[in-house]
Image (spheres, rainbow, N blue to C red):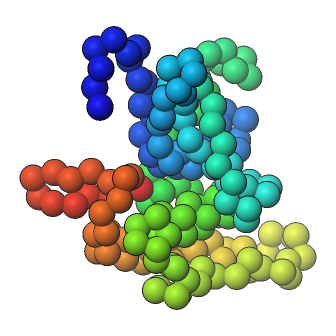
Amino acid sequence: MTDPHLPALPATAPGLYRHYKGGWYEVVATARCSETLQGMTLYRPLYGAGLTDGALWVRPAAMFHETGLFGGKVQPRFMRHDPAQVALTDLPTARALIAHLRALAERHGGIVLDQALRAPPPEPTTCCGRGCNGCVWEGYSIALHHWRGDAIAFLQRSGAACAGCETGQLGHTLIL
């Protein structure tokens, strides 16, 4: 609904975002507060309990568009990332990526990605921490890279319509 009397709604594109402090977030939608008419971003933190409880949060949409002096340099408060290009360099990033892709599948027709495709590789439990050649973390990163590629390809092929997707002249486009 478009009403010329309503203030502009600063939409935040659904997707995977990283906060300037390092935490990962999944933006689900932008909505308007019925009391204040302020634009609000509906999101899920992809760390801590947010990885498992599925709780959704809101914050003013303007915050997702802010640029400021953070950590001594001018930078955006939140930066959107392409899941296919996220560097798999640490465990919090790996966990956030897995949670994001699983949630996308669930929202796209109730697909349980681990059943429709396969489960992501298990996190290593043995590592001596000495940086060995062929470390278990290197193997995990490589396996996760392949799982991510397969998961993204599966989601793009599934083509289930949902609120987080756009339809163009060529048909369904999944917004990752």
The residue under the point 64% across, 49% down is 56
Q: How many marks?
A: 0
Residue 33 in picture, x, y percent from top left: 54, 27
Please identify the quadrant where the C terminus is shown.
Answer: bottom left
Q: Most extreme residue toward the front, as rendered?
A: 35
The residue under the point 37% across, 76% down is 154
Residue 164 in picture, x, y percent from top left: 38, 52
Name the one closer to the observer, 32 or 102: 32
Horizontal side of 105 relative to 154 (left or right) equals right
The residue under the point 90% across, 76% down is 128
Residue 139 in picture, x, y percent from top left: 65, 80
Q: Is residue 2 visible?
A: yes
Q: Most extreme residue toward the left, as rendered?
A: 169
In the rendered image of this protein, does residue 53 appear above or below residue 113?
A: above
Quadrant of residue 67 within the rendered picture: top right
The residue under the point 49% across, 29% down is 32
Name the one closer to the observer, 33 or 116: 33
Q: Is residue 61 visible?
A: no
In the rendered image of this protein, does residue 151 appear above or below residue 93?
A: below
Horizontal side of 63 relative to 70 (left or right) equals left
Name the one closer to the observer, 90 or 103: 103
In the rendered image of this protein, does residue 25 appear above or below residue 102?
A: above
Horizontal side of 92 relative to 145 (left or right) equals right
Residue 131 in picture, x, y percent from top left: 80, 69
Please identify the quadrant where the N terminus is shown.
Answer: top left
